[in-house]
Image: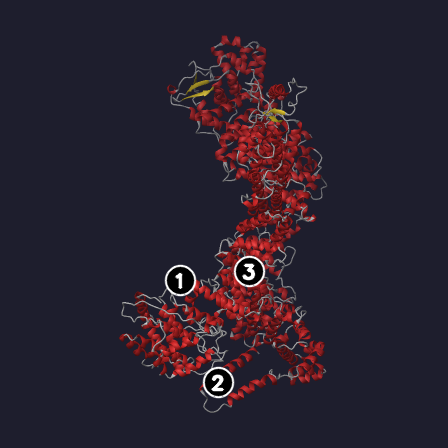
Amino acid sequence: MDRGSKSSGTSSSSGLRRGPKVKTTLAPPGDFIALGSKQRAVAAPLSDSTEPKPIIRKSVAGTKRDGLASGTAPGASLSKRSKLSSSHSFTPLGKGSESERSLHETLAVEVDSLDFVDDVLDCLDSGNDERVEGLLCGAVKHLRANRTRPDSVLFLALLYLAKLRPLVFSSEVVIDAFCSLLKRDVSYSYKSKGNVLVQTLSCSLLMAAFKDEESWPEAFIKVYMEDALGDRSWVDNEECKAFVDNILTAFNTKAPPKSSLLLQPGDTLKSYDTPSGSPSHAEDDKSADTSESAHRANTADLNNLPVLSRYHFLQDSVESLVLDIVKEQLTRRQSMDAISRNVLKLLLATCGVGEVRLLASQRLEMWLQNPKLMRPAQDLLMSVCLNCNQHNQTDVEVISHLIRIRLKTKPLINHYMLCFRELLNQHQDNLNTILKHTIYNELSTARNPNNMGLLAVIFQHFPDVAAKLLAQVFQDLLMNRDDYLRALRVLFREIVRALRHEINFPVFCQGLMVERKDSAYRDLEPALKERFLVSVVELVTLCVMLAVTPAVRESAQSRGDRRDVEALRNYQQQVALIQRDAIYWMYTTLPKMFKLGQNEYIHSLHKLLFMEQGESSHNKDNWPPEGERSLILRIASDVPLLEDTLIWILLMGLSKDLPLNAPDALELADHLVKRAAALGAETTDVLRVGRQEVIDMIFNLCAYRHPENITLPAGYTAPSLAISAMYWKAWGMLLILTAFNAQTFGQTAWEDYPMLRCFMENVMTSQYTYPPPSAVTKDNIDELRGQESQIAHLEKQHILEFESHLAAASTGAAISESNSLLLSQLMMMEPAGPARKPPKEVFEQLQKLNKLLHIGQMLCRSRKPDFLLQIIQQQGTSRSMPWLVELVQASESSLEVLPVQCLCEFLLHDITEEGEEGEEAKTEKLHKEKKQLKHRQLLGRLQTLLRDPNGNMETVQQVLSYFLKRLTSGQASVRQQAIKGLSVVLASPKEHQPEEDEDSDTEVAMDTEEDDDVTRKWLLQQLPSIALFDEVKQMVAETLRQACQVETEPSAISAYLQFLSSYMPAADMSRLAALVLDVGQLIIDRPTVMNFILPSESCRFDGADKTLAAILEIFTTYIMQARMPSKEIYSWSESQDQILLQWGSGEAATLHILVVQAMIIALTFGRPKGESCYQTLLDIWFTPDGSVPSAFLVDTSEEALLFPDWLKLRMIRANVDRLVDAALKDLEPAKLVLFVQSFGIPVPSMNKLLAALDDCLLHKHTGMDDAVLDRTYMAQLVKVQWLRGVSTGRSFYGWLSDSNADDVEMNPEEEKPVEKEGGALASVGPVKEKKEKEEEPFTVGSVRGAVARVFASELSGSEQQKQLRPLQRALAAEMRPSAATCSIAEELCTVMSGMLEGSTGAGFLASLHARTGASIPLFSVLCRIQKKSVSSVLTTFLEKIHLESKGIDSALSRFLETVMPAATSRAAGVQLSTKEGISQALAVISRASSGHELALKTIMDSCMDSTTGSSTIRSLVETLLSSPDTPMSGLLVDWLARLNPEIISLHSDVQIKLLFSGKAEADGDDEDHGSSLSQPYLLALLIHQGRYETLRRCISLLCDSPGVDDNVSPTAVLDFLSACVQIPKLWQGRDKKIPKRYKEENVLALSLMQLLSVVDFILREAEKTAEDSLNKRLSLLLRCCLGNKSLLQGVVKHLAKIIKLQKNKWQSAQRLLMLVYINAPSIRSYSETRGVLSTDPSCGADAPMQLDAVTHSMLTALARTDSAAEMTTANIKCRKMAACHPLLLLRQLPFIAACLKGRTQLNFAEFAQRRHLVLFISVLGMLELLQPALFRADTVHVHEVLESFFDLLQNYALDHGDRELVDIVRRFSQLLHQYMTLHPQQAKTCLQKHTELLQSLASLHTELSTLRSLVAGVSMSGEETAAISVMLSRPPSPWSASQMQPLKMKLSQLDSTTGKPTSSNVVAYPKSRNMFVMHLREALVAE
């Protein structure tokens, strides 16, 4: 063997550096098979290094070697062994063993172990290589002679030499010598493996010598195979692992991972453990340890070397050698039992050789079924699969053999599948081969039952690839001459069922539809090709139906539920993909493969799309079954339509090469589109199309194409015509596509295709007419109809002309309308042209289509683009749109998707219907409620849009604009409808709810005013409160300006003006000018309305002053901004309406003349009430000095007339002096006379007018003559004015009547008293004056006169009402919520009270009761005012009038008894500071017949105002304590709660008694509810209203001293503490969802002293109450001890002290301690619990326990017999709990009994196999640990558990003698014996039922004395049982005599051992004794 010097040096140096490492052990050898080896010369080149050179030997002859061999002593023994070895040559390899051995034996030199290293090194230094070989051979000879006890010195010397000079071992002779050590020494017995230390040494030496060599000798392989087939003494040894791994590289075997091997090498013994069968049992410990440690260190270094390929150049010879040996072994051992495990191990290691894999695969099935070879055979199967990585013919055959293996047991099948999973990963072609062979095997007669499982493994790991390959296999089978379609259908169903539908059906179908171009398909006959294609279609349809899983079927059957439609959606997408691929296959691939006829092509197409009849799907094998057929076909057909599918179908119709014409293609596409659309578009895209080329394709299919053989005339272009039926069908298809793809098609369809737009509007509005509603107006209806007629006429002409040319080219016939064939079938095809009128049938089809698919709703839901909004905008807000109502009703759950205009229209429609329904009879109640619900939903949606602060401004504007635009309508009903809509939309939800009507006795005018307030509320209050008001207020203002010009409702105009005043655009001058102009036009053009809403003498409008103030503010703001410094900066204009105003201060402004006049008119109404800009505006126009601004025309610069005559007259009629003076300034006499004759001029103005006339007489007497035409009339008019009170005009009257001087001297002032007293002229002057007085505001001073006139004078009924009306108005004003005072009502009560107390009191009282028409309304208003204000004056008077009315039978008395409060004013003066005062207050209240609350309020108000609150509280508490349950105690409690909300904050000493007194306990009340029924209410007030400091102080008062007053109720205290933990305020702000790791907080944080007080309270309550209150209070106690062990220990100590002292409450304390223990078992470790903790299991049995869930889970895990590991763990835990806390486990006795029930009905083998026996043994162990507390538990539950064991013994113990059953009988009898001893009567009751069973067991197990005594005790009487229980108190020994005898013998042998033991005994006896003692201890512990 060749080795270089470099490697030698490296090896040597590396050997010197390595040190010892950790010790490893070797596996014991296996069966012995003697093998020989061939001799092979190893050569190495010379090395230039100083290392010794390898010895090269080509010949084995030499005299020196012979001589050396003959002189060695050990040679004789070796020769003997050689003879022995030659007699045991089992294999061909052993033929040359004698000559081989003699070679190195003849060279052997006797060696001295001490001088061995020195001799070898000396020989090496001297170059004596032969001596070196001899020494090494001598060492080998010495090691062979002492295998069992190798010389440690020689051992270490060889190791040292291997490290120092490793190349000395590379000689051929040395290699052969050490290889001989690796062979089995036949001197040992066959079953003995001997000591392998020498063999591991040889491996280490050879590894050290050849670690750097790339090519190793073949001898290593021979010795490996010999040992591998033999006892495997060093092959499986861990110390030789590195050497063996390098040898294994010769086989190129891919080793299985250790985790997958069933037979692990570590299962055997280690290398240095001496087996029991070895020749010697004693070794030299010291030498062995030395050798072992040195060898471990050397081996550790060698095991770290890398594993390299050592036989790369000897592959052929190695494979030949291995194959010969394997074949020889397999052929020699024919029987199944003759094959050893080592042979299989060798096959496992050599599986890298293909022939070996093939041989192994042929026999694996037989080996796997052999129980002895099962594990190595499984490993061999794994190795064979892992090494099939070349995919050559050999591997294919191996796979074929593996697939045919039949296995039956579940573990083998699982391992088989695991191996195939690895086989699939070894080569990419393995999958195809395995799949194909599996399918073929499944279709064969000898099918393997594991095929389906194998397919499941394949598809699980390679789903997509496997599906594609399976399709290829199916294709190959379909091309077979035999028809495999039926078989493949059945097979595919089985595959799908086995895979549980986990198969990629689209990929499988793609594989089926792959184009076949191979010769196998090309050479097929046409009939076979046609059958192949039809079969592919059949399989594709079968795939679609097989994809219907149970989940899909369930989802499809429960579509209404919509709980789980994900499975159905996934299926639909799969089928859509399959159909897309199938259509593409039909369009592209199928025409290339075969030419089908039209019928066959269409049939296949319909079949793929499930458009054929149902019979075609099950005619082959009657699948699907009849019961599921219709459902599966429906599911398979209801699938989405993909865009590609639709396009390819359309392309089929357009293609001339395919047998599908255009009509059929369009019909097919139409059917698919409608079918997909019927699925709906709620959750998935069922009809998603994005390419607009689809539109052109559809219309191309509709086009009419004339025959190609007809030639049209030159120059003639045929018109673009379409077949009518197809054309309208195309529009229907496009309508559906647009509805489902609004975002992609919507805008294009709406803008570019008018016909499609028409259809869209038809379905959206449900109005199937032409033209559509949005396009029709009154003006264009005739135009549209004429346009349609014109288009139809031109169309007719074009078609007739076209048909004439066709006829001329063919038949030559003349074509007219009568004989035309195309006229009824064709029409012009202009998709983008104007819309056409569809036939009636089209509209009917469209209506049906919309009803079925809800296309209109889908289009209405589209927001981008928003078709619905565009229709609404086109129709306008003034037109009725009833279709919107249906649309909203159809969108119950999706109001968000509709435009807000649609919702607003529905709301208006709903409001209108509500108004109509109010007038009709109340029928259809259910329908009305439904509409109201819809109304609330829609209203809530609109209110949310308006009030959302994050809302969209555009949406808010749309909502408001929709309603506001209707305010400008000319129809009052439309405006009123809009106002109602705005009032409900702008109202908040709480404001919108109806309020209850109250009875009102006020006048109608008052109600009208309130209605007006509600009407204006939406504009002035609700609209400004919306979120985005600042952004929309200008839009609102613009609309309201227009509404003011058309509105006729005065209150609405007033509200509009107030809104415009509040939110006018002051910064924008142009908008402000427009606003002012609109207001001016309103004032001037509509005086009737404005006079009604502006203040005047006759005005009754409530908001007149506010309206005038708003107008004045608008005008003032505008005029202030419009005034400029001078007129030069103004640019002159030609407008005739504009005037330039200049003031004396230099300011100027350009205004519209209407604005100026409107401002003056506004000033004529006088100053409004409240704040206003009146004075500012008045000062601007009319300065205090009387000057007015100058006016000039803008266009001509001429001076303009600022105040025309009509305006001056208006100014004169005003009660404003400045206006009158300005109007009278520079007036001509004619004007003055004219104004005097006018009506409605007030007296002051008339005074000034007549005074002006008097002045005119002095200056212009001539003009007066012309001015007055009729002096007599004028003189009478002047006298009338004097009667009105005018004082001027004397001169004018004198001038008028010079002849009547006496009249002129008449003094009107003398007549004034006559007027007041009602003189002769009262009919003229005084009447008007009286009327004016009535119109003046009613004041406090007018009350007395009004009362006197009504009740103290003789007036008629009408006169009484007339006099009473001003007073009623004044009282009604004070009754409103906005009224600040009630001065008039108080004055009225004072006046009437004085009248009752005066001399005329009786007469006044009688007048009140007589004139009930005036008195009852008056008192009704007073009662309402009193309820609002609670005035003491009103209360006093009402009580007084009520008392005075007692005994009078009148309507007023009855009214007072009914409505007036009975609480008297006497309660107002009561003081509550003393108990006497409280008694007096209660007496006052009790005397009142009604009105307790009013009296209470009066008393409490007076008490709250006083300074004696503290004393009052104490008095109240003492009163409640003295008389807790009086009828008035509830009122006292209310007083106390109002005066002291915290209940206990002021007088804690008495308040504690009130809250927690326990007098009821002393009275013997079983239920402790405190001192009174009010105590819980007071406690609740304290907890909810008290501060936390107050609560803490209260707890301290109660719990600081343990011996608290006995009068305190423990129940009240404990309830109070429990409620404190749950205070709502304490937990506010916390997370509602409690975290998983949340730790409870100690809220009360009690100290130890306080906690002990709580314990005392709990014990006291337990003693007083009959019910078990300890369980209820336990949670409170544990909550107070939360997380504090010291507190818990203090509680335990306190309870233990009570128990030990045997106090009164010791029994309750013991029970409480037990309850604490079962909830906190850790207290058992406290020393205080010793001797006081009850051992009674019934104590606390019904108490809640946190550990119940833990113990229940442990017992549940124990009862689960399917998991041995869980049972073991649970058994340990349960035994631990039974030993430490038996009471906790005794609580689960019912559950234990239930777990044991029903398990003994099986046969014993199954009973034991299912681990039920283990469960019974575990429970029995727990029962033993639970003694003696077990027998003090509930007898019923204990007996139930025992009954289960009796059933076990009855069923199994009598027939089976298993050790476990005998042990159960023994232990169970001891348990029953203990039960009989402790509780003989109870035990006898249970045992007497099973006396026969016990006797049978006793006779069967005579050695069990316990059982015999138990039988005897059961059969005795009661007295005998009691007597014998003493005898049985000590049970006999559990060990029987037969069980103790072997133990006694062993102990006696150990004790009798004498003398000096041998070396073997020294080792053996201690081991045996220790093992015996250990087993004995384990047995005792187990028992």
Could you say which is closer to the camera, residue 1306 or residue 1894?
1894
Tell which tag, 2 or 1, sits nearer the viewer: 1
Identified by mark 3, the residue type is: Leu
Residue occupied by mark 1 = 313
Residue occupied by mark 2 = 1965
Image quadrant assignment for residue 675: top right
Tell which tag, 3 or 1, sits nearer the viewer: 1
Other-residue count near label 3 (Cα within 10 Å), few / some / many at <14 / 14–19 / ≥20:
many
Identified by mark 1, the residue type is: Phe
Regarding mark 3 in the picture, which secondary structure is present there?
helix
Could you say which is closer to the camera, residue 506 or residue 766?
506
Measured as percent of width and height from the top left, residue 686 is found at 58, 40
Identify the mark nearer the N-term, 3 or 1: 1
Q: Are marks 3 and 1 in contact (CB under 8 Å)?
A: no
Measured as percent of width and height from the top left, residue 1432 is found at 58, 44
Residue occupied by mark 3 = 402
Q: Are marks 2 and 1 in contact (CB under 8 Å)?
A: no
Regarding mark 1 in the picture, which secondary structure is present there?
helix
Return the residue found at the far bottom: 1955
Identify the mark nearer the N-term, 2 or 1: 1
Q: Tell me if residue 1941 comes above or below residue 1539 in the rendering.
A: below
Image quadrant assignment for residue 738: top right
Measured as percent of width and height from the top left, residue 1807 is found at 64, 70
Measured as percent of width and height from the top left, residue 245 is found at 42, 66
Could you say which is closer to the camera, residue 19 or residue 1246?
19
Identify the mark nearer the N-term, 3 or 2: 3
